[in-house]
Amino acid sequence: MFSSFLPSQVNQIKDLEAIAVVASIETIALVTPLSQQPILTTYIHKGRGGTPILLLHGFDSSILEFRLLLPLLAAENETWAVDLLGFGFTQRQKEIQYSPDTIKIHLYEFWANLIKEPIVLVGASMGGATAIDFTLTYPEIVKSLVLINSLGYTGAPTFSKYLFPPFDFFAVEYLRQRHILAFNIGSTLANLDPKILSAIQCAMLHQEMPGWYDAMISYVKTGGYTNLANRIAQVDKPTLILWGENDDMLASGDAEKFQKDIANSQLIKLKNCGHAPQIEQPQITSQHILQFLQYGDF
């Protein structure tokens, strides 16, 4: 039922919505200047009509974080989601250095091969920083932006650049073990909503892909999007800022900084919502995005 390149743990997912999205994952062998070999790149493409929406996931995540949001958007608009280079289920190659620059190059080639027209770029968390960086480099490609609890002002801790063996491995392994612990504890709770367990399974599935450790270490050592903050004011696209007001991962006040620095922007705060509105409140999030597409400016 599922593609053979996916980890065997995919067969443990029982949630029907998650199964449907996993089953819709497609691949393209993407030729890029980053490697002599094509990069097997994973994506989802649904819906028709309107300006294409392209969804960009967060750090140590995958297109599965949009399993609830994407079908809602695709019901009214052509919608894409892609696994960024070094993340999700997209192939990891040893010769590639994983960084914001290589992510951007790979993303451009994905757009140039499959979408080929201006897009609405939607970025969540780290994906928001990727969206900003991409927009500033290729302004002719991006029609408008949606930032969902985006990185940009809050970056990776400075020590991440100086991780060395074996501490780099232990730091990355921590990311995997926290998901395993959460799933094991959740599995023992009789009254736990099955969708919570499904969410944990989806969040950890890509961590079983070949090369996950090396790619994560490579990316973390770059410091990520640490140098983005002083460029955000250069964004001149209509920008919708969606922000779960109970976000406990990013610095308080980041949402207002985006609104202040991006001239043509609107900030909408989502009540009773944390760092991931696309998972916590997909219906409300999709409504705001589709309304933004309808009016297109502020």
Image (tube, rainbow, N blue to C red):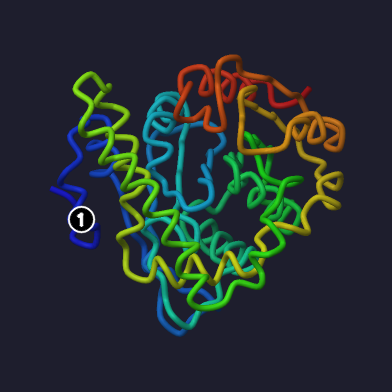
Which residue position is annotated with label 1? 3
Q: Is residue 16 left or right of residue 25?
A: left
Q: Residues within 10 Å of mark 1 (few under 14, many from 20)?
A: some
Kindly identify the residue that appears in the image at 21 percent across and 49 percent down. 10
Tell me if residue 28 comes above or below residue 10 in the rendering: below
- Between residue 72 and residue 183, name the one nearer to us: 183
> What element does badge 1 sit on?
loop
Outermost residue toward the left in this view: 1
Q: Position of residue 63 (x, y in %)?
A: 41, 46
Q: Position of residue 190 (x, y in %)?
A: 19, 22
Identify the image quadrant of the C terminus.
Answer: top right
In the rendered image, which quarter is residue 211 located in?
bottom left
Q: Position of residue 32 (x, y in %)?
A: 51, 74
Q: Is residue 101 left or right of residue 92?
A: right
Kindly identify the residue that appears in the image at 62 percent across and 46 percent down. 118
In the rendered image, which quarter is residue 185 located in?
top left
Q: Position of residue 72 (x, y in %)?
A: 42, 25
State how many labels appear: 1
Kindly identify the residue that appears in the image at 32 percent across and 63 percent down. 209
Q: Is residue 51 left or right of residue 258?
A: left
Kindly identify the residue that appears in the image at 68 percent across and 57 percent down. 157
Outermost residue toward the top in this view: 271
Tell me if residue 160 comes above or below residue 72 in the rendering: below
In the rendered image, which quarter is residue 245 located in?
top right
Q: Amino acid at mark 1?
A: Ser
Q: Is residue 140 left or right of residue 48?
A: right
